[in-house]
């Protein structure tokens, strides 16, 4: 996560975005609060914020995985005029209009776990999906004694 945020910070600075109103603000919008995966992500963002006190970096998310709740959070961040919005989308297509408004307002939009996201400044994936998927299948097969069936599910159906 720290590498991800460093890349984002470099992109924001290199883009020539002016930060006349104070320090730049980077916000991670997760799919759902209270999930261990995103709790760990928050630790990385907090470490980044501590290491870079000239940047206001924090994480937020809704208490429900409803895409509309995530869009509302992003719309509020656009109204606040943050410099960058990072998101792990519940439903990539639902974010397109909000990201379009954010981009028009010169707010960087970045996604993770959304390689199909449209209207986004950048999508950065943390790992090789094929290699990670193979690893998951190998582990599950071992745990299941090479017998049975299982179905993975990740956040959004699209």
Image (cartoon, rainbow, N blue to C red):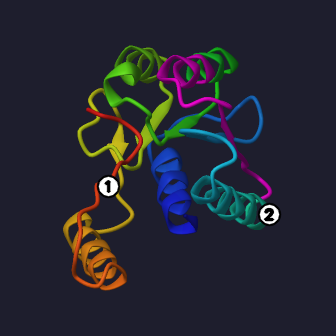
The C terminus, quarter of image? top left
Marks 1 and 2, how far apart at CA: 35 Å
Residue 125 place in picture, x, y as percent: 34, 58
**Pointer 1 local density, CA inside 10 Å: few below 14, some 14–19, many at least 20:** few
Left or right of residue 118: residue 100: right
Q: Quadrant of residue 121?
A: top left
- The residue that appears at 28% across and 60% down in the rendered structure is 150
Where does label 1 land, which residue?
152
Give the answer, above or below, for where 37 lies relative to 34: below
Left or right of residue 130: residue 100: right
Q: Which residues are magenta?
A: 53-73
Where does label 2 land, which residue?
50
**Pointer 2 local density, CA inside 10 Å: few below 14, some 14–19, many at least 20:** few
Front position in the image: 104 or 67? 67
Element under disc 2: helix
- Mark count: 2
Q: Nearer the viewer, mark 1 or mark 2?
A: 1
Front position in the image: 79 or 19? 79
Give the answer, above or below, for where 60 lies relative to 80: below
């Amino acid at each position: 996560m720290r590498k991800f945020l460093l890349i984002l910070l470099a992109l924001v600075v290199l883009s020539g975005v002016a930060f006349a109103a104070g320090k730049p603000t980077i916000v991670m919008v997760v799919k759902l609060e209270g999930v261990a995966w995103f709790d760990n992500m928050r630790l990385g963002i907090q470490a980044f914020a501590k290491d870079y006190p000239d940047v206001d970096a924090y994480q937020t998310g809704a208490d429900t995985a409803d895409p509309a709740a995530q869009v509302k959070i992003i719309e509020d961040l656009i109204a606040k005029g943050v410099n960058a919005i990072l998101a792990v989308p519940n439903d990539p297509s639902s974010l397109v209009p909000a990201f379009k408004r954010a981009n028009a307002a010169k707010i960087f939009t970045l996604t993770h776990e959304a390689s199909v996201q449209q209207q986004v400044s950048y999508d950065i994936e943390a790992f090789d999906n094929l290699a990670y998927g193979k690893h998951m299948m190998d582990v599950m097969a071992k745990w299941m004694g090479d017998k049975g069936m299982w179905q993975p599910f990740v956040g959004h159906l699209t």
